[in-house]
């Protein structure tokens, strides 16, 4: 059925189940070559389509008239619902499944959005200036004019938390309460910070160590890369288990290799000279996807098994791999402008849209 605002809801809309695999894709008008200008959002007739287990359940029109953007950074799936954020130069508007739920007088970029017991938590950055704002149902709860947020919002034990730094000090925020984190004196710099359950974790550089150290509950795990001392970046991944993506440089070759590190001596190198485009971690292990690079094909890695991505397909972003009941699902976008597909154990399920597949959940 379609509403007056142009939102279409399928027969299975609202029947959320924890094992359901959701996908979000952008649908451009038939015949339009979205590859030529995939981020414009100015073409009439664009829709955001949400699928549940391969079947369309929601279609939301895009455009200024609807106060909905096709920018992938402004689309999120939470508990079977599509959340969008939009700014009109004066206000920020958040909608759920095409219906407005929040509107407030501020122009902000929504960094992350989580929903807990029906309450909407947002972590935002001002479009102009520095700092950040944490809001609960649109109400400003924590505001800093300066400071850097690490990662996004974390939900654990019915609480919402996040981490930030400000003027060489480090903090966690839990349910709006700000707490300063005690940092040991030999910490020179902190590359990233997150919450693992209710423990504070830091990726830190210490005096006397060349590589990053994972600090958790006062203990440290040093990562040893057997002579690879050129580290481009190291960052916590927003996965179900603690995981760090470390990108090392090969200066003599002008290439990089991504390593997944789980602390202590637990680390894996999916493949040398391989940059991971999407990663997910579950109780069975790790899964990752790399896009084609030069003559090297795109690869789907799953607990030691490797499958090549079908020719001319790629993952659009970091959120295009998800696991359910030990099965891996990968959302693939066509480089030739054909319909996107969902890969599962070598089989492909085609989604009936003209555009990219943005994310799976």
Image (spheres, helix red, strand yellow):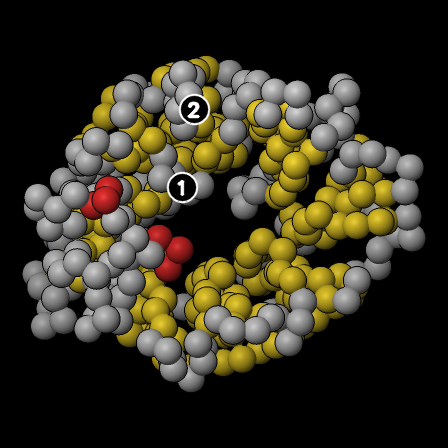
Which residue is at the front of the view, 21 or 100?
100
6 horizontally vs 228: left or right: left
| Mark nearer the N terminus (1 vs 2) | 2
Q: Position of residue 63 (x, y in %)?
A: 21, 66
261 horizontally vs 153: left or right: right
Question: What's the CA distance linking mark 1 and mark 2?
Answer: 15 Å
88 horizontally vs 123: left or right: left
Which residue is at the front of the view, 55 or 288?
288
| Mark count | 2
Q: Secondary structure at mark 1?
A: loop
- Residue depicted at 84% across the width and 59% down the height: 182
Placement of 38 over or under 100, stated as above or below: above
Q: Which residue matches tag 1?
A: 317
- Mark nearest the camera among 1 and 2 is 2
Quadrant of the snapshot with the N terminus: bottom left
Q: Secondary structure at mark 2?
A: loop
Which residue is at the front of the view, 48 or 159?
48
- Could you classify mark 1 by the number of other residues whose Cα lies within 10 Å: few (under 14), some (14-19), or many (20 or more)? some
Q: Which residue matches tag 2?
A: 293
Image quadrant in which you'd find residue 96: bottom left
Q: Position of residue 275 (x, y in %)?
A: 51, 29
Placement of 78 over or under 349, stated as above or below: below
């Amino acid at each position: 059925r379609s509403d007056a605002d142009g939102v279409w809801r399928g027969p299975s809309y609202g029947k959320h189940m924890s094992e359901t695999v959701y996908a979000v894709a952008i649908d451009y008008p038939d015949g339009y070559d979205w590859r030529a200008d995939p981020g414009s959002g100015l073409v009439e007739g664009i829709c955001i389509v949400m699928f549940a287990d391969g079947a369309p359940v929601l279609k939301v029109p895009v455009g200024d008239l609807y106060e909905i953007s096709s920018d992938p950074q402004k689309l999120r799936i939470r508990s079977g619902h599509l959340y969008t954020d939009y700014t009109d130069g004066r206000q920020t508007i958040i909608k759920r499944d095409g219906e407005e739920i929040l509107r407030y007088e501020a122009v902000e970029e929504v960094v992350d959005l989580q929903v807990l017991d029906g309450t909407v938590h947002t972590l935002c950055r001002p479009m102009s200036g520095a700092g950040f704002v944490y809001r609960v149902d649109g109400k400003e709860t924590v505001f800093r004019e300066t400071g850097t947020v690490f990662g996004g919002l974390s939900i654990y034990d019915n609480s919402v938390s996040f981490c930030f730094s400000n003027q060489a000090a480090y903090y966690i925020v839990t349910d709006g309460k700000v707490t300063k984190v005690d940092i040991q004196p030999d910490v020179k710099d902190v590359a990233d910070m997150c919450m693992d359950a209710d423990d504070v974790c830091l990726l830190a550089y210490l005096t006397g160590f060349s590589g990053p150290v994972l600090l958790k509950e006062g203990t440290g795990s040093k990562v040893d890369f057997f002579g690879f001392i050129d580290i481009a970046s190291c960052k916590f991944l927003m996965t179900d288990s603690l995981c760090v993506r470390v990108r090392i440089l090969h200066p003599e070759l002008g290439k990089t290799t991504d390593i997944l590190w789980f602390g202590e001596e637990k680390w894996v190198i999916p493949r040398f000279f391989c940059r991971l485009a999407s990663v997910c971690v579950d109780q069975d292990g790790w899964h990752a996807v790399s896009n084609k690079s030069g003559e090297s094909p795109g690869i789907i890695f799953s607990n030691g098994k490797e499958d090549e991505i079908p020719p001319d397909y790629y993952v659009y972003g970091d959120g295009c791999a998800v696991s359910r009941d030990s099965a891996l699902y990968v959302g693939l976008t066509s480089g030739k402008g054909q319909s996107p597909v969902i890969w599962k154990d070598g089989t492909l399920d085609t989604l009936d849209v003209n555009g990219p597949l943005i994310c799976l959940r």
